[in-house]
Amino acid sequence: MTNDAIRVQNMVKYFDGRCVLDDVSFNVAKGSIYGLLGRNGTGKTTIIRILLGLDSPTRGQTHLLGSESACLRPATRGRIGYVAEAHVLIQNYKVGRLIKLYKDLAVNWNDNFFNRLIETFRLPMDRRVKELSMGMRAQLNLSLAMGIDPELLILDDPTLGLDTVARRQFLELAVDLLQKDGRTILFSSHILSDVERIADHIGILRGGKLVVDCPLEQLKHRVRKLRIIFKETAPAQLYITEIINQQIQGRELILTVANWNKQKQVLLDTFKSESCTEIPMSLEDIFIECTRADSAPITTEQEA
Amino acid sequence: MFTLIKREIEDNLVDFLAAALLSAVFVFIAISLAKANLGHEPQTFSIGLLLVILPITGLVFMGMSTGQMTNDKTRKVSAFLSTLPVTRTQILLARVITGVLVMLVLFLPIFITATVLMKMFISPYVFAYHYLMEIFITIFLAAFAAYCLGLQIGLSSKRAGIVLAVFIFSPLIISLIFIKGFAINIIMLLLLVVIASLVRTWQKFVSTAL
């Protein structure tokens, strides 16, 4: 019996001969919130679509709640809530009709909870989905996904297209809802502050490869950005592995290193620099460094 | 499953209304023909009926199913439904059942009218119920085959090949009916087309990216 709600093993996906996912593997443990990050077109939505069985991988296997994605049974699907990118709902349906359809097909339906959400959002039942604003559609999509009381919630860039206020409102409610009952959440986004607020585990995709897969705190701990001042001109070669980025300006060297550890510290000390200060990094800084074309992959502590 | 069928019926209400209207037109034509005293010979009557019904219904049902699938793709309905506790097979089955129901709305009143008219106007020695039944089944299966081919046209991104096959195959079937008459071998052939077409549609629908 696995403790993972999501398992992705060696997933490869080609579109028209172009590799969009290259041997991606990661697991999401039950009860954790996994933030899947990446720039546009790095394969976040493709991973989610494959996970949900909407598309098939060229190679590899994916499992959701112990079942293979390609053959998810209705009973398993009933335990999974999904908020799609750009909120793909049936656009020509009235809100009331869409809710009724969702409710009639659901395996579990928490009427009280759903009604509370609908009251909070004040969604108009008699308007067509396509007539709703992006923010309202996001709220409707989240309400529907939460109405089934899901064990696993997959959010594919749920705040895409929302203005700052709507995004904040959406996230505040989402955070409140998500943190209850130990649900497992896969959250894809490129708005890093959103992910930083919610996720406890981070995966970063770059060019179809998963270059980061570790807990958020560990990621912050393992990526170091240092400002080193040397007595003379900074050396061009430091012999330190997994350098994500380095910028030399005279005596100053700005160095970003992945998987920072004692060995690397000792190696750096041999250069007897004049000063070495750490530059604090937000998740956004880490993301920018990690998505550089030549950055090193960040592994978990066990792997390192 | 019932919810999915209900959804399809509600989404295709226009098709049901159109089928009812078309059926009324055909019933009117049949009654007019009978009143004009053309119903004395069942062959003439049935071929006349066939001449009107077969090509029209074929095109109507092909258009209907193509429209169903095209709308589904553009509105991403199946993509949405597939994320709910249903299987793609159930989604397709609900669609096909709705198509069959539209066909029944169209053909059943015509069949009943034809039976009543034949009983009224044709001598009991000439009237053969099984003959009328064969006509009904043939027309129904031809429409169903057209419907299934339309599903494939709507689903496929490379439509030209299927459309070409339809335009070659349809006159062939109609010619066969005219040559051989309404017989069991025509029914078997149409049944084969329906099954093959349904299996191909199902295979494509469950494996395609939504």
Image (cartoon, coloured by chain):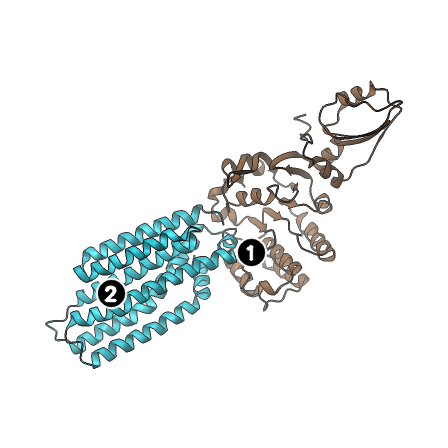
Chain colours: A brown, B cyan
- Residues tagged 2 and 1 counted as in contact (Cβ below 8 A): no
Q: Nearer the viewer, residue A296 or A7?
A: A296
Q: Answer left or right for A143 relative to B145.
A: right
Q: Which of the two discs, 2 and 1, sits closer to the camera?
A: 2
* Identity of the residue furthest to the bottom in this view: B35
Mark sitting on residue A303: none
* Relative vertical location of residue B202 with respect to residue A25 in this rendering, above or below: below
Q: Quadrant of the C terminus of chain A?
A: top right
Q: Answer left or right for B183 relative to B52.
A: left
**Residue A132 placed where, x, y %?**
62, 63
Identify the amino acid type marked 1.
Answer: Trp
- Answer with the quarter of the image where residue A47 lies: top right
Q: Chain of mark 1?
A: A
> Going 34% across and 72% down the picture, which residue do you hit?
B22
* Relative vertical location of residue B161 with respect to residue A13 in this rendering, above or below: below
Mark 1 surroundings: few (<14), some (14-19) or many (≥20) residues within 10 A: some
Residue placed under numbered mark 1 in the picture: A109
> Going 75% across and 24% down the picture, which residue do you hit?
A261
Identify the amino acid type marked 2.
Answer: Phe
Q: Answer left or right for A231 relative to A254.
A: right
**Residue A189 placed where, x, y %?**
66, 46
- Give the alpha-carbon distance from disc 2 to disc 1, as whole Å: 45 Å
* Relative vertical location of residue B12 with respect to residue A252 in this rendering, above or below: below
* Identity of the residue furthest to the top in this view: A270
- Answer with the quarter of the image where residue A3 lies: top right
Q: Nearer the viewer, residue B116 or A106?
A: B116
Q: Nearer the viewer, residue A179 or B185?
A: B185
Q: Chain of mark 2?
A: B
> Going 77% across and 40% down the picture, which residue do you hit?
A282
Residue placed under numbered mark 2 in the picture: B136
**Residue B4 placed where, x, y %?**
45, 59
Mark 2 lies on a secondary structure that is: helix
